[in-house]
Amino acid sequence: MSAPLYELTAHELSDLLGRKEVSARELVAAMYARIAEVDAELHSYVLLTRDVAEQQATEVDENRARGEALPPLAGIPIGLKDIFCTKGIETTCCSNILRGFVPPYDAGVVERCRENGLVFLGKTNMDEFAMGSSTENSARGYSRNPWNLEKVPGGSSGGSAAAIAASEAIVALGTDTGGSIRQPASLCGVVGLKPTYGRVSRYGVVAYASSLDQVGPIVKDVRDCALMLNMLCGHDARDATSINLPTPDYTQSLVTDLKGLRVGLVKEFMEYQGVGVEAEVGSAVRAAVDKLQELGAECEEVSLPNLNYSIPVYYIIAPAEASSNLARYDGVQYGHRTAHADDIIAMYTKTRDEGFGAEVKRRIMLGTYALSAGYYDAYYIKAGQVRTLIRRDFDRAFERCDLLVGPVSPTVAFGIGERTDDPVAMYLSDVCTIPVNLGGLPGMSIPCGFSSDGLPIGLHLVGKTLGEETMLRAAYAYEQSTDFHHRRAHPIPRVDGRRRAVSRA
Amino acid sequence: MRLTPEEVEHVALLGRLKLTEEERARFTTQLNSILEYFEQLQQIDTTGVPPMSHAVAITNVFREDEPQPALTPDEALQNAPDRDNDYFRVPRVIE
């Protein structure tokens, strides 16, 4: 085998583990060696859990030695976004207000990972409380893009995407409220999928905006994505929004024929309020649409005019829900409490002032204002009404199409520090992904090219409600006809056996 | 200008945030530019359009009222910043 273990996919490793050509313990050792090599620069992880990983790997190896039939992902090393409650393992959501918080229980998806024998490498970096598009809002410092260390990896699940792109994890979990799985997957050149709202349990996932949040995988290829969905999807009574339907075997959707598939290229994904996406992004997406056509799909351009209001709608609804969800961080039950307060109101306000970062405060302020007396109708109700119009646009488009496509991000990865002083410019990073959350639809990013300076470009696939299978079918057929998913980032090139120095801004 | 620094201070208190002088000034500018950006929604005619509050049409989900396993007091209190036996301790609330 020529490629190092850490560069392989989960399905390739699953075969090697099943044939006992590799042990789960060997794989863990290879992963931590890789992490030691690159993560000082990349900072994909905020916590490594080597003791846990070695114990889990040992159990998998022992079970296999006893001849037990194991699930396909048993022994596969995973990176978990720091938003998932992990029993006995610190969970901070990359916020100072949750520093030191050790959950007494596992999130529903973490339970599933444990039951399936996945091996927990550590917790990955993210924007604080998943509010951001670059990881620059993390209280633990930003991550770097493995394809270019001066660029952001995207966000908020930037640590998970960077870890996959740099081969620091085989699979990873993220969450997506306005694009936080798909945008970093696009900027890092990997596969990321946000399932239909309600498809995956959110029990034990730190809440940001509850009518939008959804959990999903970030992985190296479409087959790994299907394997992860098989494990993640399904009903959980502890999440009242969880959909109670059987989970199909998503690997059955991995076929290469797209005959009869009706695909719509969304005009408003290509240009928001008349401003077009970056030229290289646009041409890569158009080339991908041509490829889908070659594979048998029938493609046309469709217009969903109300998508032009997605950004203001999202930035009213999400902060409104966040201001309510984040009320729980009051210094009483867990997390940080100020040392300087005599009365209860001062304890709340100082605790929150010390614990929250600037973007989180900004969104709490926005949401509190939008929900306050006298402004509720003008902002929150109005945003909800326009959200209905956006959803109706999607419904209309899906009368003609089985799948919608476009770019994931209007630009390739941007520079570290480039958008931090301008909140609206940062918010526009998610212009193509946000409408999908507003509609509750499944969406996916797969690699579809590279810019002239070597940065990845992602193709955005959007399905109908519960249309994951159609998305996977198109993604797989496209992927198998290209080679973008075989490219691996080599973030720390060695020159004469020495590491290239990287400046830390 | 939609929001004055005094209103920003009031909203901060509603959200249980304490802002420094510098934060109050910065948030006043930034929140105003964001609110100005939101103005575009007022152009859309939404007469008779119901607001969408959730992506999936579901009504209340009930379960049988049966005892289920729950966290023990020690588990529930293990992350408490201040604890007194089986209670969370906070500053005096009632004078």
Image (cartoon, grey):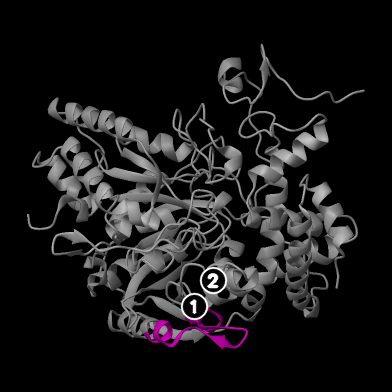
x and y, in percent, of residue A412 in the image: 42, 75
Q: Residue at x 53, y 37 (%)?
A: A204
Q: Are marks 2 and 1 in contact (CB under 8 Å)?
A: yes
x and y, in percent, of residue A126 in the image: 49, 52
Q: Secondary structure at mark 2?
A: helix
x and y, in percent, of residue B15 in the image: 78, 48
Q: Quadrant of the C terminus of chain A?
A: bottom left
Q: Quadrant of residue B11?
A: bottom right
Q: Residue at x 18, y 26 (%)?
A: A62
Q: Residues within 10 Å of mark 1 (few under 14, many from 20)?
A: many
* Badge 2 or badge 1: first in the primary sequence: 1
Q: Residues within 10 Å of mark 2 (few under 14, many from 20)?
A: many
Q: Is residue A226 visible?
A: no
Give the residues in magenta: A265-283
Query: Mark 2 sits on what residue?
Result: A429
Q: Is residue A420 left or right of residue A287?
A: right
Three-letter code for the amino acid on which mark 2 is drawn:
Ser
Q: Residue at x 78, y 70 (%)?
A: B32
Magenta run includes residue A495: no
Q: Secondary structure at mark 1?
A: loop
Vertically, is A344 above or below A159? above
Farthest residue, direction right: B95
Q: Quadrant of residue A279?
A: bottom left
Farthest residue, direction top: B85
